[in-house]
Image (cartoon, grey):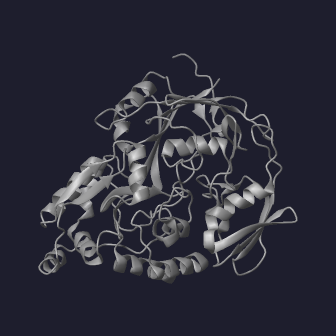
């Protein structure tokens, strides 16, 4: 019996290089492999997928060696070590190399990272393009795909293929931004699992299993550092009180206001608080005002960290207007328009966030703040430096924290964050997964991803 998964979005063509939507990433991780799958709750480490063995070869955290499993793409072609090396090497850029030596992969990092396994859980997915599209080495292959439905069937060339198929169905959001169609489908038992709901949909559901938990995600207001001067960033950060913005985002219920950029599940992080209205008003007495309203773009749909992005954006606009800083809210009409704005840096302010792919605070901070992580067409699914910050001081602090993982090194990152003010943390995420009672075996990762081949469908006795 196939597992039916409902997603509150349309389903774009499955391209592993551009799978940045949460639901699309979930589908992609069933078809395409990264070197590791993010750790599930209760697991100390991510699960090796492409590697038979993976181990450090030096004590300084700069050298590693990995021996690959024998895997085949879903079209039967063998996975070549050169393909894996090339894919991982694209992740490192100037920060390291991944090369092939005697059939194994050798990793040489410019700066230490003793938890490279965590970093490789969010590496680019390994894929190959054939006449029918992209193929991968994971447990499933695409049997059918449209905007309304994606059907995955077992990859018969996998060492342990699953026994059944998975059908992903699209239930786009209503004009009010709510997942009403998906909620109805759950109530009518048309859908077995809905893995990407938000907090505000829960009240409308009963006779289902509801999994709610903090997720490693932070919603933030990003300042485009290429367009907004430092002094103006400092004034806006001081003017904004995150508490009412978080209340607006969560509709006043179940609020997880951010006091740090890091989600609390990742680390005990130093507090980041900019709010100081008196400082903002004093600075405004001598600050040159913008000659036109600042454009505040927002993410195109609700997220675990922003159940109601438009309400949060209006709270930001209203607050900044009270300081005589006019703001124009520019909604993203589609994933494509949001993606285009992110790639081009076409905004002064951006209301969005990031969901960590694992439990490593160094990777989470690096993806958001490292100069190499300004989004580009090649890094759209892994780079989240939406403030477009290029700061040697931040890069140095991040490298030191990645190498040593000490409280002092984390405080150094936070100090540069306070000085540069590329963003204001607003909310933390709460992941919501709903499934029917007959679904067993789902184990979410800290990022909300699932290995859906582990799901089991049992038989319910009639009531």
Front residue (pair 440, 69): 69
Percent coordinates x, y for residue 250 in the rendering: 30, 49
Q: Is residue 2 above or below residue 124?
A: above
Question: Can residue 223 be seen in this snapshot?
Answer: yes
The picture quadrant where one finds residue 284 is: bottom left
Q: Quadrant of the N terminus?
A: top right
- Which residue is located at x 38 percent, y 37 percent? 202
Front residue (pair 190, 144): 144
Residue drawn at x 27%, y 50% as measured from the top left: 330
Measured along the vertical axis of the image, is residue 259 above or below residue 35? below
Residue drawn at x 16%, y 61% as measured from the top left: 326
Q: Position of residue 262 (x, y in %)?
A: 44, 66
Residue 385 occupies which quadrant of the picture?
A: bottom left
Q: Position of residue 231 (x, y in %)?
A: 25, 78
User: Which is nearer the eye, 156 or 267?
Assistant: 156
Position of 277 relative to 352 (above/below): below
Left/right placement of residue 460 relative to residue 299 reads: right
Q: Position of residue 204 (x, y in %)?
A: 35, 32
């Amino acid at each position: 019996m196939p597992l039916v998964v409902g997603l509150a979005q349309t389903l774009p063509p499955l391209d592993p290089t551009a799978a940045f939507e949460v639901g699309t990433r979930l589908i992609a991780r069933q078809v395409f492999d990264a070197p590791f799958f993010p750790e599930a709750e209760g697991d100390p480490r991510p699960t090796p997928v492409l590697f038979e063995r993976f181990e450090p070869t030096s004590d300084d955290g700069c050298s590693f060696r990995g021996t690959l499993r024998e895997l085949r793409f879903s079209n039967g072609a063998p996975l070549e070590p050169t393909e894996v090396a090339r894919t991982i090497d694209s992740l490192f850029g100037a920060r390291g190399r991944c090369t092939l030596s005697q059939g194994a992969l050798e990793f040489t990092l410019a700066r230490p990272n003793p938890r490279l396994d965590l970093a490789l859980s969010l590496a680019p997915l390994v894929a190959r393009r054939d006449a029918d599209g992209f193929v991968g080495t994971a447990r499933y292959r695409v049997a059918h795909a449209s905007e309304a439905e994606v059907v995955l069937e077992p990859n018969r060339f996998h060492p342990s293929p699953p026994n059944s198929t998975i059908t992903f169905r699209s239930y786009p959001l209503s004009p009010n931004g709510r997942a009403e169609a998906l909620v109805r489908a759950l109530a009518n038992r048309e859908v077995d699992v809905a893995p990407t709901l938000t907090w505000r949909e829960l009240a409308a559901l009963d006779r289902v299993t509801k999994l709610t938990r903090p997720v490693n995600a932070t919603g933030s207001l990003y300042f485009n550092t290429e367009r907004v001067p430092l002094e103006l960033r400092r004034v806006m950060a001081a003017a904004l009180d995150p508490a009412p913005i978080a209340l607006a985002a969560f509709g006043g219920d179940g609020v997880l206001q951010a006091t740090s950029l890091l989600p609390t599940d990742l680390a005990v992080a130093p507090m980041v608080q900019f709010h100081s209205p008196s400082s903002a008003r004093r600075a405004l007495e001598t600050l040159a005002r913008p000659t036109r309203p600042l454009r505040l773009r927002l993410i195109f749909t609700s997220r675990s960290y922003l159940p109601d992005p438009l309400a949060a954006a209006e709270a930001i606009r209203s607050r900044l207007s009270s300081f005589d800083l006019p703001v124009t809210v520019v909604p993203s009409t589609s994933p494509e328009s949001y993606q285009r704005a992110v790639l081009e840096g076409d905004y002064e302010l951006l209301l969005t966030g990031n969901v960590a792919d694992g439990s490593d605070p160094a990777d989470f901070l690096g993806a958001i703040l490292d100069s190499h992580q300004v989004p580009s067409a090649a890094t759209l699914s892994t780079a989240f430096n939406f403030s477009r910050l290029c700061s040697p001081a931040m890069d140095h602090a991040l490298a030191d924290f990645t190498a040593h993982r000490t409280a002092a090194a984390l405080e150094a990152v936070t100090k540069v964050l306070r000085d540069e003010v590329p963003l204001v943390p607003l909310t933390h995420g709460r992941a919501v997964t709903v499934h029917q009672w007959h679904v067993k075996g789902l184990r979410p990762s800290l990022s909300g991803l699932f290995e859906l081949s582990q799901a089991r469908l049992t038989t319910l006795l009639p009531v």
